[in-house]
Amino acid sequence: MIAQGQLDEDGLSRLVAVFYERVRRDVELGPIFNDAIADWPAHLSKLTDFWHSVMLTSGRFKGNPMMKHLIHRARIRPDHFDRWLALWDTVTLEIMAPEHAAALQEKAQRIGESLKLALYYRPGNAARGAA
């Protein structure tokens, strides 16, 4: 597949759709996401808004990703973030133009690290972070 997606509505919508289709089929990530999300079309729309806001500073996304991850903390392990990021890297390279893929990967890496730190490595969570 030729990487040519742009950082616009169509490119981000396609990226989110392809990426989360793969997440849903992933042996480790799929069960977590499929159990947590009842309405995939609505969730994909919200995720597209998230990436639109993150990458294009549009302010379209309204929500609290940290709280959503905290709700599912018992099922999420720190290594799940690494698996998610590896899959994200693969799909962004397939779907997006190289410069956009790199920017999306860098942003996702920072977001993932922030989520991991907040969920597992803050004071009082030392025992969970060691898992």
Image (spheres, rainbow, N blue to C red):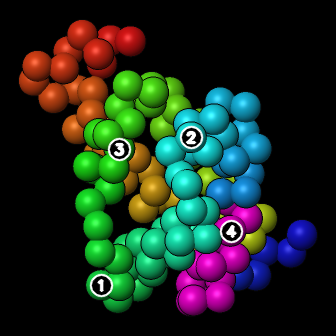
Identity, as a three-letter code, of the amino acid under mark 4: Ala
Which mark lies nearer to you, 1 or 2?
A: 2
Looking at the rendering, in which quadrant would you find the N terminus? Answer: bottom right
Q: Is residue 7 in the magenta section?
A: yes
Q: Earlier in the sequence, mark 4 or mark 3?
A: 4
Residue beneath label 2, please? 35
SS for dot 3: helix
SS for dot 2: helix
Tag 3 and tag 1, C-beta contact below 8 Å: no
Magenta-highlighted residues: 6-19
Identity, as a three-letter code, of the amino acid under mark 3: His
Residue beneath label 1, please? 59
Camera-side residue of 43 and 85: 43
Within 10 Å of disc 1 (Cα), the crowding (few <14, some 14-19, many 20+) is: few
Camera-side residue of 49 and 98: 49
Within 10 Å of disc 2 (Cα), the crowding (few <14, some 14-19, many 20+) is: few
Which mark lies nearer to you, 4 or 2?
A: 2
Relative to 113, 3 lies left or right: right
Within 10 Å of disc 4 (Cα), the crowding (few <14, some 14-19, many 20+) is: some
